[in-house]
Image: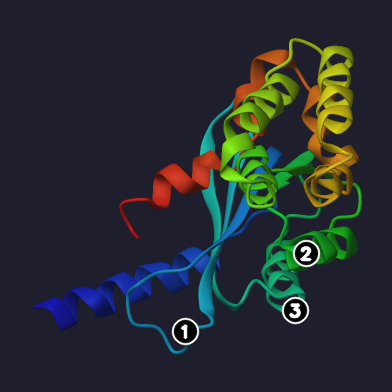
Amino acid sequence: MISSLKRSWLDDYHQWQKRDLSLKRYVYWWADGIYLKARMDSDKACMLIIIGADETGKKELIALHEGYRESKESWRYVLNDLKSRGLNIGANLAVGDGALGFWGALSEVYPTTKHQRCWVHKTANILEKLPKSLQAIAKQKIHDIYLAESKLEALAAYDDFMNYFKVKYPNAVNCLEKDKDELFAFYDFPAEHWVHLRTTNPIESTFATVR
C-alpha cells in the first residue's frame, strides 16, 4: 500500500513540476534550502524551496527541487526551470538567508528582483561573534533596527549598534555591515507587508513539521 501511494505521489509531483506558469505573477518570493533527516542520496543534498505571494497576497509553493548544498548551479537550475515554463518576470523582492548560491543565480536569471536578507539568520550569525554576556543587549539593538517604524529610524538604530560594538567586536560589526543594503530592502515596500518580508518564516514554519 505504501509503495502504491508513493508511486501515486511521485506521479503527482512530476505533473506539478511541469505545470504552466505563464499566467503567474508573484510580488514576493521566499527561498531557502531545507536539510531533512529523511534518507536522501547524499548528506550534502537538500530541498530547494521557493514560496511566492501573488498580487492578491495568496502564498503558494512555486518550486521544490533536490539540490547540492544550496550551490549556485543548483539554484540556477531551479530558476531556469521556472523561466522555461513561462515565469518570465521575477518577483519584486526575494527574501533569503546568506547562502550566496541563491543570490548569485537570482542575479543571473532574474536580475531585476531585489534582494532582502533574512533578519533571523543574520541575527544568529551576529550573536555567534559576541560573548554570551553581550548577546541579550545585541539582540535588542538588532530588534531596534528591523522593527523600526521607518527606514530613517532603522538606520539610526543601525548606527547605534555599530558605535556600541565596533571597537571591541569588529567581526560582529562586519557581519552586519556587509549586507547593509540587502537588510534594509523591505523598507521600500508597503509597511503592512514588512512583518512578512523581514524573514524566511513562511518557509521555516511550513516545513517545520516536515523536518
**Residue at image point 47% right, 84% down:** 43
Look at the numbered disc 1 and give the secondary structure of its residue: loop
Where residue 192 appears, as percent x and y from the top left, is 65, 14
Q: Nearer the viewer, mark 1 or mark 3?
A: 1
Residue 12 makes an appearance in the image: yes
In the picture, residue 68 is in which quadrant? bottom right
Q: State the residue in front, 172 or 13.
A: 172
Q: Which residue is mark 1?
A: 43
Amino acid found under the numbered disc labelled 3: Glu
Distance between the alpha carbons at the discs numbered 2 and 3 = 11 Å
Secondary-structure class at tag 2: helix
- Give the amino acid type for the residue marked by disc 1 in the picture: Asp
Q: Residue at x 8, y 78 (%)?
A: 1
User: How far separated are the C-alphas under marks 1 and 3?
Assistant: 18 Å
The residue that label 2 is drawn on is 100
Tell me the amino acid under the disc marked 2. Answer: Leu
Residues under labels 2 and 1: Cα distance?
20 Å
Give whichever of discs 2 and 3 has the lower sequence position: 3
Quadrant where the C terminus is found in the figure: bottom left
Which badge, 1 or 3, comes first in the chain's sequence?
Answer: 1
Q: Is residue 107 left or right of residue 97?
A: right
Q: Which residue is mark 3?
A: 73
Do the residues under discs 1 and 3 have CB atoms within 8 angstroms? Answer: no
Residue 100 as seen in the image, left or right of residue 48: right
